[in-house]
Image (cartoon, grey):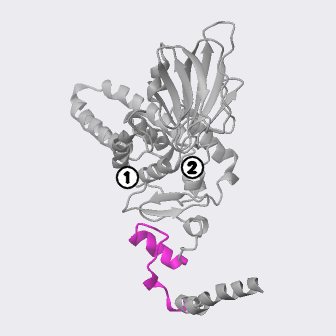
């Protein structure tokens, strides 16, 4: 939205909503242009002055849960537009965030923060290398941690949030509470293996082209076999590859979990959200199971939760004992729910013994009268 709207336009003013607590942005003096680059969950805006004597302003934005940029006429600003850039043609480019979880801050230069890893989509090779190197150099970082928890580490999986990790794990066939060390260790040599497979395929193609006419039928059979193998391999993408391809689906289909519609007609968000819900396979689906991780976030899945489930799933007051938990994720949509009738006899007996009797209605009515009598004395 930013680059498509800002291209060919000049801006002259930047304002901040008075209800937002973040500081305003000191835009360049006079006219300026706007461009933006995204990386994972972050976005870097550059305000470049038209005059050569001015200095550029760099704004690092984090969209939070519901933040997005919108372009509209000045008279049709969104109710929750918090940072507005006014163009000379009467339009406004604005940052909209209903929940105000998003942030922005001015930077001294266009450098990205060091606590975020490469973007899995735009910098996939660097992202893959960073994860593989982390597994090799810092194995202790992954010991005893489920893969669903590690996938929220933005220093490695930049931009992968709650719904993306669920969809990626489902497509990869990896249980959310599987050991992160075991899952990622299998991918450590995948980059080198992929390169080796490409070389083998190119060599085999050259050899097949140089075969005589008497072997054409054999070549056709081998080509068909290789095509079938490629089809099967494409269905079995590894977890790191899916960290690129699943977000790409959302981007290419222009889907969004929270936003949609124009600033003047915010009710059209419903249609956009319905498209997103139809795309989902497991996240927030009624026939899927869920558990709460140690961050307090729900992770949705199908099938067994993984070996570290009992150890790493967050314990709440509605949790069952380990035996009933294992049954719950297979039979109900919620891992943490259990019918009261299924309580074992010893558990029910202990609950009854510790139950505190409630005061009767008669006792409650006498207390105010006694208090008022003391006040009169």
Place of residue 205 in the rendered image (x, y in percent of width and height, measured from the top left): 36, 28
Q: Is residue 264 left or right of residue 178?
A: left
Q: Quadrant of the C terminus?
A: bottom right
Q: In the image, what residue occupies the spot 30% across and 42% down?
A: 228
Residue on which disc 2 sits: 151
Residue on which disc 1 sits: 281
Count of all numbered marks drawn on residues in the image: 2
Residue 276, quarter of the rendered image: top left
Compared with 370, 326 (above or below) is: above
> Could you say whether the residue bearing mark 1 is in a helix, strand or loop?
loop
Q: For the residue carrying disc 1, how many other residues have a C-alpha within 10 Å: few (<14), some (14-19), or many (20+)? A: some
Q: Give the range drawn in magenta.
A: 321-346
Between the residue at mark 1 and the residue at mark 2, the CA separation in whole angstroms equals 18 Å
Place of residue 298 in the rendered image (x, y in percent of width and height, measured from the top left): 52, 59
Compared with 36, 171 (above or below) is: below
Q: In the image, what residue occupies the spot 61% across and 15% down?
A: 48
Residue furthest to the front: 376
Residue 147 highlighted magenta (yes or no): no
Front one among 352 and 321: 352
């Amino acid at each position: 939205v930013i680059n498509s709207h800002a291209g060919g336009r000049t801006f002259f003013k930047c304002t901040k909503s008075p209800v937002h607590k973040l500081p305003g942005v000191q835009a360049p003096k006079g006219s300026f242009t706007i461009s933006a680059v995204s990386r994972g969950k972050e976005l870097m805006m550059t305000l470049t002055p038209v005059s050569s004597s001015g200095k550029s302003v760099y704004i690092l934005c984090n969209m939070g849960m519901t933040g997005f940029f919108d372009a509209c006429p000045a008279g049709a600003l969104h109710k929750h537009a918090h940072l507005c850039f006014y163009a000379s043609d009467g339009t406004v480019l604005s940052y909209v965030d209903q929940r105000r979880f998003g942030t922005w801050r001015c930077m001294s230069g266009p450098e990205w923060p060091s606590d975020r890893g490469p973007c899995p989509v735009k910098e996939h090779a660097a992202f893959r290398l960073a994860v593989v190197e982390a597994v090799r150099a810092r194995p202790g970082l992954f010991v005893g941690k489920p893969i669903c928890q590690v996938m929220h580490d933005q220093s490695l999986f930049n931009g992968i949030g709650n719904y993306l990790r669920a969809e990626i794990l489902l497509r990869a066939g990896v249980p959310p509470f599987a050991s992160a060390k075991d899952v990622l260790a299998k991918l450590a040599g995948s980059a080198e293996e992929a390169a080796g497979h490409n070389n083998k395929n190119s060599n085999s193609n050259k050899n097949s082209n140089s075969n005589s006419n008497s072997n054409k039928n054999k070549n056709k059979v081998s080509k068909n076999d290789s095509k079938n193998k490629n089809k099967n391999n494409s269905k079995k993408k590894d977890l790191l590859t899916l960290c690129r391809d699943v977000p790409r689906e959302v981007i290419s289909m222009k889907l969004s979990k929270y936003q949609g519609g124009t600033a003047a007609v915010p009710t059209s968000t419903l249609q956009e959200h319905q498209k997103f819900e139809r795309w989902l396979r497991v996240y927030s689906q009624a026939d899927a199971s869920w558990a709460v991780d140690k961050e307090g976030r729900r992770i949705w899945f199908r099938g067994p939760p993984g070996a570290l489930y009992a150890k790493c799933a967050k314990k709440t007051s509605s949790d069952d004992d380990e035996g009933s938990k294992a049954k719950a994720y297979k039979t109900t949509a919620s891992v943490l729910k259990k019918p009261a009738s299924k309580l074992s006899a010893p558990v029910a007996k202990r609950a009854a013994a510790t139950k505190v009797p409630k005061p009767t209605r008669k006792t409650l009515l006498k207390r105010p009268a006694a208090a008022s009598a003391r006040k009169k004395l």
